[in-house]
Amino acid sequence: MRKGYLYILECSNGTYFTGSTINLEKSMLAHFSGNGANHTKKYPPRNLLYLEDFWEINHAFRREKQVQNWSHNKKSGLIAANVEQLKVLAKKHNLTQYTVRTMTEH
């Protein structure tokens, strides 16, 4: 099995895009360059707000489906509780080119 990631992006219209991937850097490049999912093509992402890593992609995919069904407020709570972890993981995965902000910086 391959390692997987769940991520949440903040889009230009204030919505969140929740996705999962085995190649985080490739997915971020796609979303931020306008070549990602239809939602991020229509509402370009501003920031990577949240990240979870999993030993297996199927766990990340299941988590993605769970979080996608959550309200905006519930996702905001998830994001706010893990901002420091995201900063550590972003450095670990060399994703420092993507802005990391706390929810209070909006």
Image (cartoon, rainbow, N blue to C red):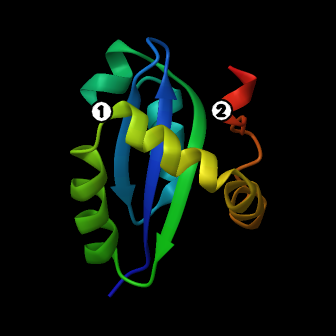
Q: Quadrant of residue 100?
A: top right
Dot 1 alpha-carbon crowd within 10 angstroms: few under 14, some 14 to 19, many 20 or more? some
Looking at the image, is mark 1 or mark 2 nearer the viewer? Answer: 2
The amino acid beneath tag 1 is Ala
Observer able to see residue 86: yes
- Which residue appears at 24% of the width and 57% of the height? 66
Residue 73 in the image: x percent, y percent?
Answer: 41, 34
- Residue 41 in the image: above or below residue 67: above
Residue to which mark 2 is pinned:
103
Q: Nearer the viewer, residue 106 or 11?
A: 106
Instruction: Identify the image quadrant of the N terminus.
Output: bottom left
Labels 1 and 2: the sequence-earlier one: 1
Viewer can see residue 36: no
The mark tally for this picture is 2
Report whether 16 appears left or right of 89: left
Please provide percent x and percent y for residue 44: 46, 18
What's the amino acid at mark 2? Met
For mark 1, what is the residue?
A: 37
